Every structure is written in C-alpha cells, then in structure tokens.
Image (tube, rainbow, N blue to C red):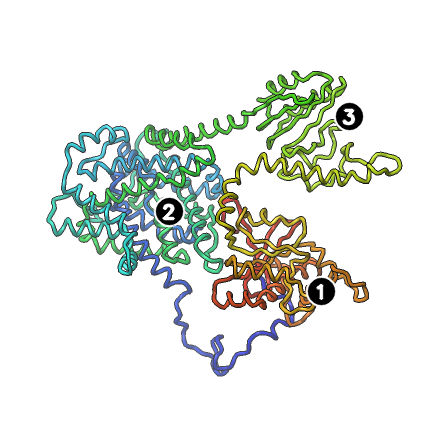
Amino acid sequence: MTATPATPSSAAHLPATSPSSRSDGHRDGRPDRRPDRRLPEGLPADLSASVAVFLIALPLSLGIALATGAPLQAGLVAAVAGGIVAGRLGGAPLLVSGAATGLTVVTAELIQRYGWRTTCAITVLAGCCQLGLAFLRTARSALMVSPAVVHGMLAGIGVTIALAQLHIVLGGTPQSSALANVRGLPAQFADLHPAALGVSVLTLVVLLGWPRLPGRTGRALRRVPAALAAVAAATAVAALAGLSLPRVDLPSWHSHALPELPEGPVLGIVAAVLTVTLVGSVESLLSAVATDKLIATGRGRDNRPPRADLDRELRGQGAANIVSGALGGLPVAGGAVRSGANVRAGAVSHRAAILHGLWIMLAAGLLVPVLDLIPLASLAALVMVVGVQMVSATHVRTVTRHREILVYLTTIASVVLGGVLEGVAIGIAVAVAVALHRLARTRITLEELNGVHRVWARGQLTFLAVPRLSRVLNQIPYDAQAVIELDGSFMDHAAFETLQDWRDSHVAHGGSVEVTGRAGSRTPESGRADGGGPAQRGAHHCCRPWTPWKNHCDHRATGREEDRTPPGPPTAVTAAEPRRRGAGQLASGIIAFQRDTAPHVRDELARLAREGQRPSQLFLTCADSRLVTSMITASGPGDLFTVRNVGNLVPPPGAEATDDSVAAAIEYAVDVLQVDSITVCGHSGCGAMQALLNSHPEAPMTPLRRWLRHGLPSLERMHSRHHPWARIAGRLPADAVEQLCLTNVVQQLEHLRAHESVARRLAEGTLELHGMYFHVGEAQAYLLSEGDDFFDCRIFDSVGGHA
C-alpha cells in the first residue's frame, strides 16, 4: 500500500503548472467541455495479448473437445464462457480459462457412461458446488493436497490423453481406456494411414520447431503462436494436396445439444459431480498460483496486477461452469498454457481474457467454413503434445528431491489404470502413509566411549519410538555417565515422559545424565553433570534442541543450575565462565556445521572456490546481531556481497574524517564484481540512530562518535521541512527513533549516488539502488519505493507471491 507524505507543507512543493498546461478539465481558467477520448490505461496491451491467446485457445479448444468425444462446438462454448464469465468474475487477473485439459479423461468417461446432455447437467451442478465452496472460503484448502499427488494426477491425465490421441494421429480410433489403447497400439501400427500420419507429423514438426526458428525472420515469425502455425500449416497442406481425411465438422448451432435432467444412478451422478468439482477446482487454483509466480519472476513491481484472490477465482470458475454447461459446453478450468501465453504477451488486466472470449465467439459464428478445413489428425497431434507436456520433468525432479517419487508414480499409475478420482484417492492414501512412515522412522543408537554412554536419537520421537528408546536406555548401567543427543524437530508427550522418568531414575541411582540438542548444547531438561539431582520440569524452555538456533537465549537468565553463579565471593573461575561458555558455543556451532550443513553445501562452495564469487547484489546493512542477512533475504553462499557497519552508513566522498573501507567495498562490488544492484538495509531499534538522537556536542570525541558523524545528514533531513516524513505500511513511524531509522536509509542512498563508480553505472542503466527496512519485532521487511520518501510493504507468503 502506497502512502502519501504527511507534512502539511508538502503541498507547497508540488510542481507549478501554467494555465495552458492544466490537466483538470480547464483551459485558461474556463471549463473544457470536450470529452476525454483517451483509451483506458493498459487497453492496447490487453488487446494485443487477447489476440495472441485467441490464436492459441481456438485450436486447443477444438482439440480438447475432440479428445473427450464431445461435439466440437462444446470446446468453443467452454472457451467463450471461461474467457468472458471467469475472466470478468474471477480473482486472478491474468488467468485465462477455457475447456479443462485436466478434465479431458473424466469428461470422456462421463459422455460414454451417461451421454452428452447429462454430462452438461453434471457440469452445471459442479459449477454450483464450486460456488458453494467459494462461499465457504475453502479455496486455500484445495492447495492442501500434496503437490506430488496433484502433479501425479495431471501427469496421469496427460499419459491417458497422449495414448488416446496417438490412435487418431496414426489414423485410427481411440479405445475406451488407457489399457485398451496400449493393447491396441500394435494393431494400429500395423494398419497405418499415411495421409493422417503425414499431417500429424507435419503438425508436430512445426509445433516443436517453431519456437526455434533462427535469425531475424524467425524472430518475427515466432510472434505467431506455434499451435496456430502448426494447425494452419497442416490444414493448408491437406487442402492443397487434396487429402481425404476426417476434418472438423461444426454443425449448425440450431442443432446444438443443451443439457437435460441427469439420468442414471444417484450415487454415480454425485460421484461424477464431486470429481468434476475437485479436479476442475484444483487445476484452476494451481494455475492461478502458477500464473502469480510467472508474473512475479517476469515483471517488475510497477508492472504487476493484483495477486490472485483464490476464493473469488473459485466463484468465477463456478459461474463459468454453470454458463458453459447450460449452453452445452465442456467443463471449464483455468489453463496454464493459455495463461502463460497471456502473461508473456504483456496483458495487464482481466480485459485480455474477456476479449479472447469475444474473439472465439466471433470465430465460432463467422469462421465456420475455415474451421471445417482443419484435419482431425492435426488437432489430435496438438492435444497429444499437450498431454505429453503434462508429464513435467521439473515436477519429477522436485518430487524426487523431496523424496516423494513413490507418491507421484503411484498416483500416475492409479489415474491411468483406474480413473482420476480413484487415482487421487490412492495417491492421498500413499502420501499419508509415507508421512506416517517418516514420522515413525527414528534411529536410536548407543555407543560407549571412554566410559561415557552416548545415545543418539535421529528423527521424530513419538509414541511409536518409545519401545526402542526404552530398550536402548535400559542398556546403560545405573551408575554410568550418559549423554542423550536429540536430533529431531518433534517430541511428543509419551517420549518426553519416558525420557524424563528414565533420567530421574538414573540420577537417583548415582548416574549422571546430560540431554543435548543437535549442536551439543544442553537442554533445560538436562540433569546436572555432577549428579546433583534432576532439573525441574518447569525450567526455562526457550532453548529446546529443536529450535533452529539457540544463541538467542541469555542462559545467565535461565533456570539452569550449571549457568548460575554460585553463592559466595567471586573467584577467577567465576569471572572466566562467560569466556568458556562463549568458546563452547563457538565450538559446538562449528561441530554442528561440519556434521549437518557442510555435506549439503560442500559441492556449491567447491564450485564457488573454482569459479570465484559472482554476487548479484551489494547488501549494506547494520552490524546489529539481530540482522541475519542470509535469513531475511533467503540467500546462500555467493549471492550477496555484504558490508556491515554501525548504523548502515555510507560516508559520502570527500567527507571529513571519511572512512575508505566502505568506499573501497562499494568500488570493488560495482567495478570488479559488476553487481546488478545495491541495497541499503536499516532496521528498527537501531542503537546508532538512538545514539545520534541522544548525542551531546560537549561529549568527548571517540571513534564511535567520529563514525556517527556520517549520520548527521540523516538527522538534519528528518528535522528539515523540505523533506516529507517517511511512512511505513501506510502509517507514521511509532517514534523518533523509527523515523530516523527510515530517514537514514533514504539519506544513505543519496550518499551512494555521490560515489563516482555508482553514478557512472546508474547513468549507464546497469545498476539499481534499493532501500530496505527490517522491523525486528515484527520479523517484517519493507521496501523503499524508488525515488520516494515512503515505504511500500510487501508481505510474502508460502505460495511465493506478495500480498
């Protein structure tokens, strides 16, 4: 949300306008009654994108209708309803809906079982169910299904589509199931139809080779969608050669079939409605999320439409399905192919989807003679490629990396062999079983070294692991020294009680117990190493072994007996204790890194050692220990060239008592490393800014005070009436310290521009400057709008977009 400056005097700094240049409808002081003929903002871009999407959606809609066995007009009706209705009412501005690719197999089964008119009624009922789910605001719940199951479902549907269309490509007729299509392939290969095969091969060659056309001519030709070019080329060759082939047959709209009351078993109809609702909703919502990600990665902040409202999008999909089914169309869903083309074509709003629906409606009424020339084999080849592309290599790598390949393959096989609903149900069951297996899989080992019995528990300690844990603990002698290392992220009550009871008993019999986490630091539940009794169960719990990092706790303030200063006069041992504790933390941290992190980053660090660093960004921030740059920027080795100092200050060139270390880092990053951007990051509660506000002129000059003199321009800027106050997320700063922290980021960006190397790269247009503010207490980052004195808040969620 963008906020405006809050100072009363800001109006005085607006640029003056002459009477002849006023844009408020007046000219020379007199009203200008001429109508404003300017086009709506973004309409030219939407118009151009709508034509590109129309050229892709037209053959694709006919091909999907062919694959389902529905009347070919049904694909056009679905495209019109998806474009106009879902485009107008949906919540994803650049999502383009039409005939649902993911429902191809389901729709084909419904047509075979219940007939076309009943299938239309099922589509209407599914749309009503989607409206109900949207009213209950369950759109986000649809994304709860494991991605491995969703990707497996889409891949299984793609395999089924490809097998069926392969028969048409070869000149035959597809069978009723995937297995039947596989069994029929040998006979189909033995009875090839050269004309159909030739047209199909030509379609595939053009479709796959079109994006790779070289040279300037190829770049110009690539503006025509590959799908349109492939179908047009095949149609032209078939027409000029006079080939006798089955072609598109669009009968008169007067004989177009409309829905009727569902006929068939009630449970079967209900199952069909739920299947269409589930698959169509998941496909649409995933496409909306994928479109948001595509926009975020391909466009700047100033050129992005609002993020998708998934509940509203589900309402739009429900309304589109009701309209499509009522008019005799296929089920509707958002499509990744059409939406991706819409984004790449430069669309900026929902107008592009609506216009594409209007073009298809005009084509369905005016271009019927042209559409009737398209060979069915060409459409089948196009849809077959779409089906193959649904088996994404990227998804395979992702599920393999997350060890969910079993779920993925099981879902594919189940969808191909049993159907979509059965496949999804089996996939979810396997995903749950895998999750339970991981939860229950815990490695517990015992090792004796120099009289110390060490127990390692790797994994989650739940009630399922209690028998093994108890068996291993009982192997330790009563009076032995024991160390229990917990290497997991979860411990349930049963495991905790088992471990606690054993520890109490072991210490009572004269033994000693130390319970540690992954980094080797003691936990609050640990007993004293000297066997002096159990730790209290109500001890301080801020440093459990499953916390990501532990040095945020001041152990001197906890209830741990070993960290308390013993009573009596201070001794040399007591004075040295903090140093030993710091060294112990450092050593345990190094051990944890070598054991847990180094194996994962060793290859990447070896590559960086060979190739050298190539960071894309210079990140200049405060030395405050609460700012973990890699955490708040999700960066890793080689990503950031980081400079930290007290107050994230950038001394301007030629300043009195300048510090060349920052200037040297800037010059090295800009001229040698050739970074693309520089970010100055301030933070809340900055001690340097507090010191600036509380400074006294008569105070003695120290190194810290000399350094903070570079922050005086920020203090002057904050008190100046010539600069508007900074705002944060639409509100004024909470206090003067926060105001100075924000103003300091703006001022340091100005200091950056004064450096010769930065100014040169900015003039060349090869460098960007960014301001950032991190609120420590809220764990929230704010980005400074370029050239302004206010902050825009960007909140990022788990899906990857900003809210």
| In the rendered image, the vertical position of residue 535 relative to residue 734, given as above or below | above
Tell me what residue is drawn at x 17 percent, y 38 percent.
171
Q: Are marks 3 and 1 in contact (CB under 8 Å)?
A: no
Q: Label 1 amino acid?
A: Arg
Q: Nearer the viewer, residue 74 or 616?
A: 616
- Residue at mark 3 to residue at mark 2: CA–CA distance: 64 Å
Ranked by sequence position, the earlier of labels 3 and 2 is: 2
Q: Label 2 amino acid?
A: Ala
- Residue at mark 3 to residue at mark 1: CA–CA distance: 53 Å
Q: Label 3 amino acid?
A: Asp
Rendered image: mark on residue 336:
2
The secondary element bearing badge 2 is classed as helix
Question: Could you say where residue 73 lies in the image, as x and y percent from the top left?
Answer: 25, 46
The secondary element bearing badge 1 is classed as helix
Q: Are marks 2 and 1 in contact (CB under 8 Å)?
A: no
Label 3, on which residue?
530
- Residue at mark 2 to residue at mark 1: CA–CA distance: 55 Å
Tell me what residue is drawn at x 56 percent, y 38 percent.
598
Label 1, on which residue?
709
Can residue 251 be seen?
Answer: no
Can residue 413 be seen?
Answer: yes
The secondary element bearing badge 3 is classed as loop
Badge nearest the viewer, 3 or 2: 3
